[in-house]
Amino acid sequence: MNKTVAVALSGGLDSAVTAALLKKENYRVIGLHFLTGYEFPPSESTPSRPLSRINPWAQRVSEQIDIPFEVIDCSEAFERVVVRYFIDAYRSGRTPNPCMVCNQRIKFGPVLERAKELGASILATGHYARIRRKANGEFCLLKGSDLAKDQSYFLARLTQQQLGRAMFPLGSYTKKQVQEIAKDCGLTSSLARESQELCFVRHKGYKEFLSVSAGFPIEPGLIANTKGQTIGHHQGLHAYTVGQRRGIGIPGPAPYYVIRLEREQNRLVIGSKSDLAATECMVSDINWIAAEPPDKAVSVKTRIRYRHQEAESILTPVGLHTAKIRFSRAQYAVTPGQAAVFYQGERVLGGGWIA
């Protein structure tokens, strides 16, 4: 009997091509589309919508590929795990990374569990990353072959158990190749363009989402320079993130950047780009992908945000899930709350949160 694989159909070409490729390889494929509860703009939201009508694209793709299809309502878990994490991070003055949380705790949480209930031993997604199994049975997470599209960063918090149930069929393809496969198969995307935004923010931006949906109060405060001198006022710290240049509203001889958010004083500190430079940082709550994490200082390359060029670093463990990272060259906008992911060559060692 052919092996059963479930595919998380998100709405884009990547997940559609993933399902098509697996079907061609004679897997028994099941299409799964999970609901977040944020599929519609706030003005169009209703208490309930028939699940069969919630995403006609996913249904159509499943029919094109000729695979069974199911919609899973993950709205309660998504709200509790992802959205609350996002809101709480901003309340504490940190910049969240909800996609990493969603991958670990929703896609490879309840979606994977439902896949197993349907008889699938594996959950496949459209991520550009690869998995390699070592002779001792340990799973390694590797970069995607298309380095311009590599998404291993967003998967760095997956555990050995989750990687053992994961499949990333696009890991050895380039984006251009995937687009050509989609064209040959007649597959289309439900998205007007490739999404780079937060899937649950249907407002003008995350600031409006926090104000309207999360009920963030307007708490004006002081803006100070790095010398502690007050030079203006802000309308709420949640509207700013470390490294931000636009939207500060303070004129100066050179552009100002957000240097830090002082939550207790409700104060925003701004300065020049050079003030953003950092030669080290602490990373906490690290998920080590390898069964045996490093027990001494090791040389790594650290990525401090998705589009960041990995930086040569020395990682020194401080306890089991905390490490000190010292960069060989100063890095800019090392942002508390964002994920730091560690690489050795093409292999992901793990990832945690910048403290």
Image (spheres, rainbow, N blue to C red):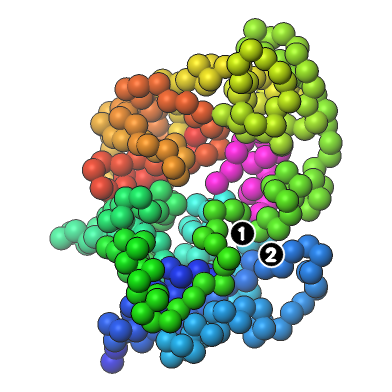
Boundaries of the magenta span: 83-97
The residue wearing badge 2 is: 38
Query: Mark 1 or mark 2, which has the lower sequence index?
Result: 2
View extreme (left): residue: 135
Left or right of 343 on screen, residue 11? right
Classify residue 183 as left or right of residue 172: right
Label disc, if present, on residue 164 of the rendered structure: none
Tag 1 secondary structure: loop
Foreground: 290 or 103? Answer: 103
Mark-to-mark CA distance, 1 and 2: 7 Å
> Residue at coordinates 52% horizontally, 60% vertically from top-left?
194
| Quarter of the rendering containing residue 180 | bottom left
The residue indicated by pointer 1 is 199
Residue name at image x 61 percent, y 54 percent: 198
Coordinates of residue 70 in the picture (x, y in percent)? 55, 83
| Secondary structure category for the residue under label 2 | loop
Callout 1–callout 2 Cβ contact below 8 Å: yes
